[in-house]
Every structure is written in structure tokens, then in C-alpha cells.
Amino acid sequence: MDSCPNIGGQEINRRMRTGYLGLFLTLCFFTYVLILEPGHIRGLVIFPALMTTIPFLEVKEKTCIVNAYFGTKNMGEKYERERDTTFLKKQRSSSLVLTMKGVFIALVITGILYLI
């Protein structure tokens, strides 16, 4: 799929920081669950896993799912309205795919924790 970026500069850096924070929280949760074995609380790993996967996927595609929904872009300076309808359609379809990929990966991580 052709990428049609709607974020750049500081927005990419912010998503990288959020992704690494989510990765840290996911690893902490994994460690907690493996050491204490709290039972069905294992399913809660999906939330930090989503906090990890979606920002990293947004950085890879340079497409923010929220900006695509609202039809805006932020290439580092300020928010602007996306005027090109073709780009907007690509951004929205890309954001839907990113969301589905992120949820799938988070579910796989949660499933792995249940199998361990």
C-alpha cells in the first residue's frame, strides 16, 4: 500500500517515546505475571501491548490514526487540514489497517503470555 504521511518531525519522536514507554510497561507486566502468576489478570497485558504496537506502526507508516480520522496532518510545525481527498482516503485506509495490525499483534502478545 502506498504510504501517504500525515505526521513528521516531533510527532514521530513523540510516538517513538510512547512506544518505548509501552514496551517497558509490557515487559514489566510480563515479569510481574511470570513471577507472581496472578491468574486471569494476564489478559490485561493487551493494554500496554497496544500502547507499544500502535505508535511503532504509526512511525513506520508515518500515519497518525487520529489525524487521518479528523482529516488533518502535522508535519512538525502545526496542524493543517488535508485538502487532497485522494491522500485523505489513503490515510484513512492506512489508519484502519494500522489499527487492525496493532490489535492483532497485541492479541498475539496476550496469547503468548497465556501459553507461558
Image (cartoon, grey):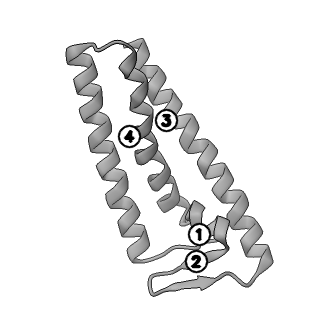
SS of the residue at dot 2? Answer: strand
Distance (Cα) linking label 3 and label 4: 8 Å
Question: In the drawing, does residue 61 fall left or right of residue 19?
Answer: right
Quadrant (top left/top right/bottom left/bottom right) for the N terminus: bottom right
Distance (Cα) linking label 1 and label 4: 22 Å
Residue 102, by quadrant, is top right
According to the picture, the residue beneath numbered tag 2 turns out to be: 73
Cβ atoms under marks 3 and 2 closer than 8 Å: no
Quadrant (top left/top right/bottom left/bottom right) for the C terminus: top left
Q: Give the residue type that dot 4 points to.
A: Pro
Q: Give the residue type that dot 2 points to.
A: Lys
Distance (Cα) linking label 3 and label 2: 26 Å
Distance (Cα) linking label 1 and label 3: 22 Å
**Label disc, if present, on residue 81 of the rendered structure:** none
Q: First in sequence: mark 3 or mark 2?
A: 2
According to the picture, the residue beneath numbered tag 3 turns out to be: 106
According to the picture, the residue beneath numbered tag 1 turns out to be: 67
Cβ atoms under marks 2 and 1 closer than 8 Å: yes
SS of the residue at dot 3? Answer: helix
Disc 1 vs disc 3: which is toward the camera?
Answer: 1
**Label disc, if present, on residue 48 of the rendered structure:** 4
Percent x, y for residue 73?
A: 58, 77
Cβ atoms under marks 3 and 4 closer than 8 Å: no
Distance (Cα) linking label 2 and label 1: 6 Å
- The residue that appears at 59% across and 60% down in the rendered structure is 65
Q: First in sequence: mark 2 or mark 1?
A: 1
Q: First in sequence: mark 4 or mark 2?
A: 4
Question: In the drawing, does residue 84 fall left or right of residue 69?
Answer: right
Asked whether the viewer can see residue 2, the reply is no
